[in-house]
Amino acid sequence: MAYSYLNAEEMINETIIFDEREAVQGGSPFNIAYGIDKNFLFGCGVSIASVLLHNRDMDFVFHVFIDVLPEAEKQHFSQLAKDNKTCIQIHIVNCDRLKAFPTTKNWSVAMYFRFIIGDYFIGQQSRVLYLDADIVCQGSINELSTLALGDSVAGVVPERDKTWWLSRSQSLECPAIENGYFNSGVLLLNIPAWASEYVSGKAMSLLSDKNVTRKLSFMDQDILNIILAGKVTFIAAKYNTQFSLNYELKDAFINPINDATVLIHYVGPTKPWHNWATYPSAAPFVKAKKSSPWCEQALLNPDNSNYARYCAKHSFKQRKYFNWLINNIYYYYLKLAR
């Protein structure tokens, strides 16, 4: 029997399927999975739309793992599947076993859904592409469907440089990470290798150990780097080009996004679906949004003090001084209202 630490029958309460595919003429669809909470539904929907927009020649099955799905969003995903003749499966996750693990103000238990995802496909698929919901596609991902992984558990993109790898290896007390530390926003999962390495079981064990969790800065990402050190294949940076929209607040910066970039990863607190992220660097998101059922949805206003602070900063940078004033007042109001 195939190994599965996180039993799908226990972890998935319900699966809602929107399958609008026409008869497939041979070949297998490429499976892409997301693990989110409700705050990332908008981004996830547009992310799927962006993949479809730039990969018309591919057959997909998209999987969204989430703890709750509002009825209005259910309709959006249904329409997205219908408009693109694709298949979208929504898996409602039982979070009970995950609530004991550490979270932060920016990262909910949804960050651990990628462990459920890895186990869910054991015995079903050999390859699954996991994407964070703040990733926008602007090119072909066809190569990832056949990219050789050998015995590696995942194809990943390294984060930063060797200095950073050394720093993380020392902080995590894992010398092997010095040879490469990866970002977990894009994981091309080799499911049989994931199973043979007992990744989820090891992860849950480490996350239950306070001597380990005190060392973590990036929670699930650090855990995956510890478990998979030396067991991954590094792939081209174009498949996970990280960019923070808060770089726009600087007087000067180097934008890593170019015509060759395939997957843009909008890291940091400001996301392209925020209404203060009105920069050319967010244009790929806007383009995909226009092609999706979310085309009429307004970009999101700040709904907490942290976002109000960033909104004010960006408004000042954009010389929208009235907005800057209003959001500064809103920021202090939210701070005092705590």
Image (cartoon, rainbow, N blue to C red):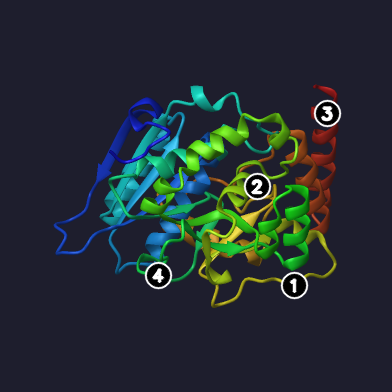
Residue drawn 51% across the image and 44% down it: 42
Q: Earlier in the sequence, mark 2 or mark 4?
A: 4
Q: CA distance from mark 4 to mark 3?
A: 49 Å
Quadrant (top left/top right/bottom left/bottom right) for the N terminus: top left
Give x and y (percent) for residue 145. Answer: 36, 65
Q: Secondary structure at mark 1?
A: loop
- Given this view, does label 2 or label 3 mark the residue nearer the observer? 2
Q: Are the residues at dot 1 and dot 4 in contact (C-beta closer than 8 Å)?
A: no
Element on which disc 3 rests: helix
Given the image, on which type of amino acid does mark 4 rest? Leu
Q: Which residue is label 4 attached to? A: 147
Pointer 3: what residue?
A: 335
Residue 244 visible to the viewer: no
Work out whether residue 155 or residue 227 is closer to the camera in this orientation and state it: 227
Q: Residue at x 55, y 46 (%)?
A: 298
Mark 2 burial class by Cα count in 10 Å: few <14, some 14-19, many 20+:
many
Going from N to C along the chain, the mark reached first, 2 or 3, is: 2
Tags 2 and 3 touching, CB below 8 Å: no
Q: Nearer the viewer, residue 286 or 176?
A: 176
**Residue occupied by mark 1:** 254
Drawn side of residue 85 relative to residue 198, left or right: left
What kind of residue is marked 3?
Lys
Mark 4: give few (<14), some (14-19) or many (20+) Cα within 10 Å.
few
Question: Judging from the image, what secondary structure is the residue with disc 2 in?
Answer: helix
Distance from label 3 to label 1 (Cα)? 33 Å
Residue at the image point whose x is 64% and y is 38% from the top: 107
* Residue 17 vertical placement versus 315 (above, below): above
In depth, the one of 304 and 63 nearer the eye is 63
In-front residue for pair 191/307: 191
What amino acid type should be assigned to the residue bearing mark 2?
Answer: Asp
